[in-house]
Image: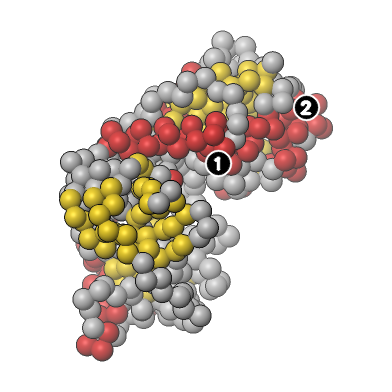
Amino acid sequence: MSRKRIDLILEGVTIEAVAAEGKALTHVDGMVVFVDFAVPGDVVDIQVYKKKKNYMEGFIKRIVKPSEHRLEPFCKHFGVCGGCRWQPLPYEMQLEAKRQQVEDQLVRIGHLQVPEIRPTLPSEATRHYRNKLEFSASCSRWLLKDEDPNTLTDKDRMALGFHVGKFFDKVLDIEQCHLQKEPSNAIRLFIKRFCLENGYEFYNIRENHGFFRNMFVRSTEKGDFMLILVFAREEEDKRKALLDALVKEFPQITSLYYVINEKLNDSIADQSPVLYHGEDAIYEEMEGLRFKIGPKSFYQTNSRQAYRLYSVARDFAALSGNELVYDLYTGTGTIAQFVSAKASKVIGIEYVPEAIEDARLNADANGITNCDFFSGDMKDVLNDAFIREHGRPDVIILDPPRAGIHPDVAQVILNAAPERMVYVSCNPASQARDLAILCRDYEITAVQPVDMFPHTMHVENVVALKRR
């Protein structure tokens, strides 16, 4: 059923501040109004699309007078693509908005006692900073406002780009993305052109049919590239023709994989990528340490900023060289190995078996002998028996997924009673919830937001805790 239209326009309203989820806010007749793509100081007419008892939501129908802070978006897809929503907002304002977001979640909503929250650490690069992007293929792309669907051919409807927010089956065709360095754009455009010229069927996610499904591009700071192409079924001749064309056109591709994914969802976490050409992995380096990145490996998406993030975590851990450290949700063991030189021993635990395999290989390659890694669901692996066997940690570092930690894990941590903890999170909301549990026995001694994703509302946050 379609949403009922709200025939309400708010005229000549001045935007007051940046709000959560990439929106801005103002007040009209005592009611909060959240507005998409607005900048504090803008005077705008607002088309309201949602009205509740205590708030409204809307979009800019007309900019009456732009804010003195407003910048011209640098991407032609701004406003349609769901990413980089803060392009019109000066970077300094983005950083302060992220610091405020952390304060709101921890203090105003979480009611936690925290010291003064430090200014957000800026990213050295604000464009071309991502080392991993996923693009989806679709035979039914998102149509722009000025397009007449009746004039489009089947080829005109093909897309290779990003999913449009709130529409799982619609993909915006991307001409140029500013998030990853070249040849990321060139590779994607070549694949689309080759597929169209050779009659390859793009995927229909709603009806679950088609041939070419999605692709991943991974890169390193030194310029290595990994490309993973995902097909919905095996058609060997067509698959090989595309892969061979890529090898010829882009000799700089270090590692070329393909996946045959016949499932109903796009995730390749449970799939087996097949190496078609080149090396089996690419490598990132940090303080002389070398980290192997395979097709399914987790690595922080902003490589240069990851170094700053891990440096903060290591500083907050305040290691003297004698501590037993547990690194929970260790991924490929990057934090574990990064702090290992200042610890007696580090134990890393991670859910993904392939990541633990990479962690062990990385440790061996780096000559690190004081790290042990274990694979399994955190709430199943980390229990009182595990701690009795491997030793009570002096310091725990945890970097969980967005959902945060399971309550059972929080209780085991409290039972282990380490002297210090460092909680790294990409979601201050779930972090605040978990900290409320941990702060039964701990106090927060430092809070440092880190900007890993410029021009977005997302923020990484590092919290130091000390046992009371």
Percent x, y of residue 444: 59, 22
Residue under numbered circle 1 = 429
Q: Within the image, what quadrant is residue 91 found in?
A: top left
Q: Report the side of 92 relative to 416 (left or right).
A: left
Sequence-earlier tag: 2 or 1: 2
Q: Is residue 265 above or below residue 415?
A: below
Q: Within the image, what quadrant is residue 394 found in?
A: top right
Q: Residue at x 24, y 39 (%)?
A: 90
Dot 2 alpha-carbon crowd within 10 angstroms: few under 14, some 14 to 19, many 20 or more: some
Q: Residue at x 32, y 64 (%)?
A: 9
Q: Report the side of 317 relative to 416 (left or right).
A: left
Percent x, y of residue 137: 37, 70
Q: Which quadrant of the figure contains the C terminus?
A: top right
Q: Is residue 350 above or below residue 272?
A: above
Percent x, y of residue 119: 38, 25
- Nearest to the observer: residue 100 or residue 431: 100
Q: Amino acid at mark 1?
A: Ala
The local secondary structure at tag 1 comes to: helix
The local secondary structure at tag 2 comes to: helix
| Front position among marks 2 and 1 | 1
Q: Is residue 375 above or below residue 439?
A: below
Q: Residue at x 65, y 41 (%)?
A: 405
Dot 1 alpha-carbon crowd within 10 angstroms: few under 14, some 14 to 19, many 20 or more: many
**Residue 240 appears in the picture as rendered:** no
Check if mark 2's residue and mark 1's residue have beta carbons within 8 Å: no
Query: Which mark, residue 415?
Result: 2
Q: Amino acid at mark 2?
A: Asn
